[in-house]
């Protein structure tokens, strides 16, 4: 859901060239202007180039870990003319470790419609003309990795930026969807993102940004019809800017929105691949594989019923890029209830009541 996800951002804005000092964190943002150019001739800035490089690095790393010889396809597409932007949809299928994995980049140029401009300006965006007509830029990298083994969790992540009226804002995150719960995996996963959040947290005790991003992730990836959360969460943020008046994180502040967004993306492989290596060779039964595919049904239910980006994109979006996040094999068996005292039941109990994985 590459194009669809970036278009749902609607928030306060951030200067496209955030200020930096000698005390900036190690992932300080590159300048907004760049001489890089895409294969379609669209000029790229530093953040857009970062998305493309990260996509290439992720795909190469997953091919190495999978080890089967399965490779990511490279499906490049344009949005109207070359000047309107383009995307690259990359998908690996049929691997030994990853039954399906996708990593999608969208780099879009366009003009705000009056409808969207009014929606943005009504939320206090003084830079946005409510009559529309202003140029905008949107870019995103989104990914989802569906493992073959039920012992390896599904991983989903994205980062994105929207710019208009001389301002820009950021969103992104990462979350884990296990089918069999290993508490140490969830603790390690959350611990790594807490450390990243703490690096950019302006609070003295370095506790506010992670807490806000975890809470947002738990609340967003929720399936009301099932009264379950999709997985064990992670971090999620949107509408992020440097302006001190920004309340995107409920009072928590990061000291550099773009650098923070990049740092989240830089953590993706380090947070996920160690889990893959620990669990990939664990034996599992036919019944456990069936449970895996049944739980994948919940993944589809969330995406189609509740994910704002998917729902927006299904209304005229590029359907293959939107549905690429779907797992290849799914079951909907009637009224499935895990056995009392089973590992399956333990997972469901945690999904119904999210845990605090790190303090």
Image (cartoon, rainbow, N blue to C red):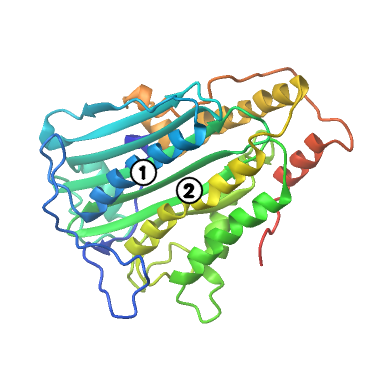
Residue at 77% x, 22% y is 287
Check the image and report above or below for 229 versus 303. Answer: below
**Residue denoted by label 2:** 269
The answer to whether 156 appears left or right of 352 in the picture is left
State whether residue 252 appears in this view.
Answer: no
The answer to whether 33 appears left or right of 308 in the picture is left
**Label 2: few (<14), some or many (≥20) within 10 Å?**
some
Check the image and report above or below for 328 versus 51. Answer: above
- 330 and 305: which is toward the camera: 330
**Label 1: few (<14), some or many (≥20) within 10 Å?**
few
Contact (CB < 8 A) between labels 1 and 2?
Answer: yes
Residue at 22% x, 40% y is 108
* Image quarter of residue 260: bottom left
**Sequence order check: which comes first, mark 1 or mark 2?**
1
Check the image and report above or below for 173 versus 203. Answer: above
Q: Which quarter of the rendering shows the C terminus?
A: bottom right
Query: Whole-Å distance between the Cαs marked 1 and 2?
Result: 10 Å
């Amino acid at each position: 859901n590459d194009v669809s996800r970036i278009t749902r951002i609607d928030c306060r804005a951030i200067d496209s060239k955030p200020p930096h000092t000698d005390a900036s964190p190690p992932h300080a943002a590159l300048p907004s202007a760049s001489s890089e150019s895409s294969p379609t001739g669209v000029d790229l800035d530093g953040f857009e180039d970062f998305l493309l490089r990260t996509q290439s690095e992720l795909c190469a790393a997953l091919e190495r870990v999978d080890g089967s010889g399965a490779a990511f396809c490279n499906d490049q597409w344009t949005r109207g003319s070359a000047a309107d932007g383009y995307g690259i949809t990359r998908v690996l299928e049929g691997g030994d470790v990853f039954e399906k994995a996708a990593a999608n980049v969208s780099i879009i140029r366009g003009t705000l419609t009056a409808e969207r401009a009014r929606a943005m300006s009504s939320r206090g965006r003084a830079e946005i003309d409510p009559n529309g007509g202003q140029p905008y830029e949107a870019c995103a990298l989104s990914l989802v990795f569906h493992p073959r083994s039920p012992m390896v969790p599904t991983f989903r992540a994205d980062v994105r930026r929207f710019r208009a009226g001389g301002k820009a804002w950021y969103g992104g995150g990462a979350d884990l969807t296990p089918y069999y719960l290993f508490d140490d995996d969830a603790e390690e996963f959350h611990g790594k993102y807490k450390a990243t959040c703490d690096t950019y947290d302006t609070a003295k005790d370095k506790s506010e940004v992670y807490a806000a991003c975890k809470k947002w992730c738990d609340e967003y990836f929720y399936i009301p019809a099932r009264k379950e959360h999709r997985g064990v969460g992670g971090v999620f943020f949107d509408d992020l800017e440097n302006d001190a008046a920004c309340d995107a994180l409920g009072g928590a502040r990061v000291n550099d929105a773009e650098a923070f967004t990049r740092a989240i993306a830089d953590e993706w492989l380090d947070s996920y691949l160690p889990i893959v290596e620990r669990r990939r060779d664990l034996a599992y039964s036919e019944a456990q594989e069936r449970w895996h595919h049944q739980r994948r049904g919940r993944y589809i239910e969330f995406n189609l019923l509740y994910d704002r980006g998917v729902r927006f994109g299904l209304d005229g979006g590029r359907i293959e890029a939107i549905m690429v996040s779907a797992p290849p094999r799914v079951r909907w068996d009637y009224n499935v209830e895990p056995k009392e005292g089973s590992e399956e039941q333990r997972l469901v109990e945690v999904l119904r009541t999210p845990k605090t994985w790190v303090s």
